[in-house]
Image (cartoon, rainbow, N blue to C red):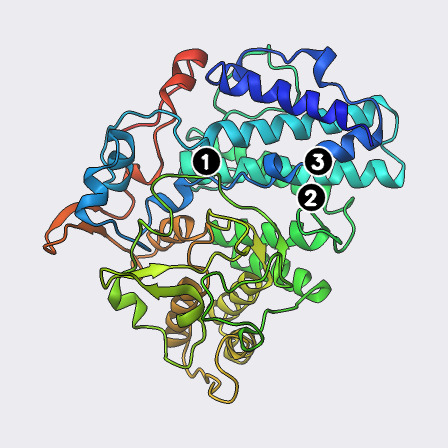
């Protein structure tokens, strides 16, 4: 495998991104450094998990209600992180966590991979199809993450509000502009429809996309857009291929890092880049939320620990001890919850309870779980949504969940931040424009694209 080519590509991209403050939006990479010469080179590019799998934006978690910071930690944050934590209308929108940079770097590499496959005339070979499918998935995955944090959710065919810039080529000399929200989601779906035809059903390595991963992402996006029929269809298609769950009875939930490295429940590995706010020793979990976990629910021990100051800390990183940041990938657990929720919404309580019970039986101590029986849609849905939050804690979905709940008057939330005395110091009402973050100021300055409204 030509690792020299791979290293040149990655180094060239890193210099381009980090030394130029997003000039990748305006400048074309040096082709002498960035063109792989074989399918082996493309494989090396797409297997660089430090670059392509470390792309879950910290902003997916930083605004949620799943954690709080005590006064000392908050006071020691810089103005940008304070502004994000407190949902301020305006704050210094500088690129501290790489949310924008890392996602567009991954998109650039995906484009280079597809261009190389085409240039080598390998689009119809088995390996060429697989590599193209992986690149299409990567582009869709990163575009969706960007859309979640920088745009509202909308109808992909009707919505004319601003989406994100879309990049289809490694030639970055062309003009940069924000597409409409409809165009953004249309492009994401186009890539997913294409990649699902090219990818193998399952992957031997969870850092590589598969057909199961594509269906899982399609289910996640459909759910976020309130398309429950499609969400259930894609979740069930994924589960029909792969449905393994991690049984917490078979691991030591008392360990500091209880989850095995790349365990069987992970369909696609993605984790966030490091962030100085959301790290385990800084954040605390609301005690009322912690108490929602039954004592026989092994997640209570696997996810949480008591801190020296008496507060509840989080230890349940789902990708294992090798990762110090939150998990942002795809799991079978999420698919069971999507399937259960969608079944409940269409009134099939038998299927809804079956899917939820299958999941929870693997999470409770053996012999102590009593299966749920649902008798009405409202209570079934409420229970499933509660379990969704409890299961998918710090897995990059809570922000989009809150945004979709806020479109339903029955589930709207007003988020609040409190100080150590219990006083409310910030709030975020449902449907507020602060639910989509400010684009980094350097990006606005260099590209002249529109900033999000405030």
Residue pictured at 50% horizontal, 65% vertical: 258
| Residue carrying label 2 | 193
**Badges 1 and 2: C-beta atoms under 8 Å apart?**
no
Relative depth, front residue between 229 and 130: 130
In front here: 74 or 132?
74
Circle 3 crowding by C-alpha within 10 Å: few under 14, some 14–19, many from 20: many
Tell me which residue sits at (63%, 18%) in the image. 12
Q: Is residue 238 visible?
A: yes
Helix, strand or loop for disc 1: loop
Quarter of the image with the N terminus is: top right
Q: Residue furthest front?
A: 308
Residue in front for this viewpoint, 11 or 177: 11
In x, y percent, where is residue 160? 44, 31
Q: Given contact means CB atoms under 8 Å apart, are the residues at marks 3 and 1 in contact?
A: no
Residue 98 located left or right of residue 142:
left
Element class at badge 2: helix
Query: In front: mark 3 or mark 1?
Result: 3
Q: Quadrant of residue 198?
A: top right
Disc 3 target residue: 46
Q: Is residue 380 above or below residue 205?
A: below
Q: Nearer the viewer, mark 1 or mark 2?
A: 2
- Sort mark 2 into few (<14), some (14-19) or many (20+) by Cα contacts within 10 Å: some
Identify the residue at horizontal 37%, vertical 70% (top origin): 382
Q: CA distance from mark 1 to mark 2?
A: 21 Å
Report the residue marked by disc 1. 159
Q: CA distance from mark 3 to mark 2?
A: 20 Å
Residue 320 lies in quadrant: bottom right
In this view, the mark in front (3 or 2): 3
57 relative position to 208: left or right: left
Look at the image and tell me whether residue 115 can be seen: no
Sequence-first tag of 3 and 2: 3
Please state the horizontal and vertical placement of residue 214, each as a whole percent of the image.
66, 49
């Amino acid at each position: 495998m030509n690792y020299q080519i791979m290293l040149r590509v990655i180094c060239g991209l890193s210099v381009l991104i980090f030394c130029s403050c997003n000039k990748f939006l305006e400048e074309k990479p040096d082709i002498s450094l960035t063109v792989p010469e074989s399918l082996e080179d493309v494989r090396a590019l797409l297997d660089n998990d430090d670059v392509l799998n470390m792309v879950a934006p910290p902003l997916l978690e930083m605004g949620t209600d799943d954690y709080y910071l005590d006064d000392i930690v908050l006071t020691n944050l810089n103005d940008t992180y304070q502004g994000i934590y407190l949902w301020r209308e305006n704050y210094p929108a500088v690129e501290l966590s790489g949310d924008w940079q890392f996602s567009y770097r991954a998109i650039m590499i995906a484009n280079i991979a597809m261009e190389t496959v085409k240039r080598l005339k390998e689009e119809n070979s088995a390996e060429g199809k697989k590599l193209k499918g992986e690149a299409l998935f990567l582009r869709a995955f990163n575009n969706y993450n960007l859309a979640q944090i920088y745009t509202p959710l909308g109808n992909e065919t009707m919505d004319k509000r601003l989406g994100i810039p879309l990049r289809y080529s490694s030639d970055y000399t062309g003009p940069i502009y924000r597409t409409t929200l409809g165009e953004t989601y249309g492009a994401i779906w186009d890539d997913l429809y294409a990649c699902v035809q090219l990818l193998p059903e399952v992957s031997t390595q969870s850092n590589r996309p598969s057909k199961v991963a594509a269906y899982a992402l399609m289910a996640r996006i459909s759910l976020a857009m309130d398309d429950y029929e499609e969400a259930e269809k894609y979740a069930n298609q994924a589960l029909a291929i792969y449905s393994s769950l991690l049984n917490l009875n078979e691991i030591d939930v008392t360990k500091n890092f209880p989850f095995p490295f790349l365990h069987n429940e992970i369909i696609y590995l993605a984790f966030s880049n490091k962030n100085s706010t959301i790290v385990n020793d800084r954040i605390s979990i609301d005690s009322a939320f912690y108490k929602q976990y039954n004592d026989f629910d092994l997640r209570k021990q696997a996810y949480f620990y008591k801190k020296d100051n008496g507060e509840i800390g989080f230890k349940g990183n789902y990708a294992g001890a090798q990762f110090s940041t939150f998990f942002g990938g795809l799991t079978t657990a999420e698919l069971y919850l999507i399937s259960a929720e969608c079944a409940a919404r269409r009134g099939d309580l038998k299927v809804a309870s079956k899917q939820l019970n299958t999941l929870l039986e693997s999470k409770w101590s053996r012999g102590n779980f009593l299966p749920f029986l649902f008798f009405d849609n409202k209570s079934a849905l409420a229970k499933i949504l509660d379990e969704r939050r409890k299961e998918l804690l710090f897995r990059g979905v809570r922000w989009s969940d809150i945004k979709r709940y806020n479109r339903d008057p029955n589930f709207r939330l007003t988020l609040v931040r409190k100080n150590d005395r219990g006083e409310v110091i910030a709030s975020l009402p449902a449907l507020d424009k602060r639910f989509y973050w400010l684009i980094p100021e350097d990006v606005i300055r260099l590209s002249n694209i529109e900033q999000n409204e405030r």
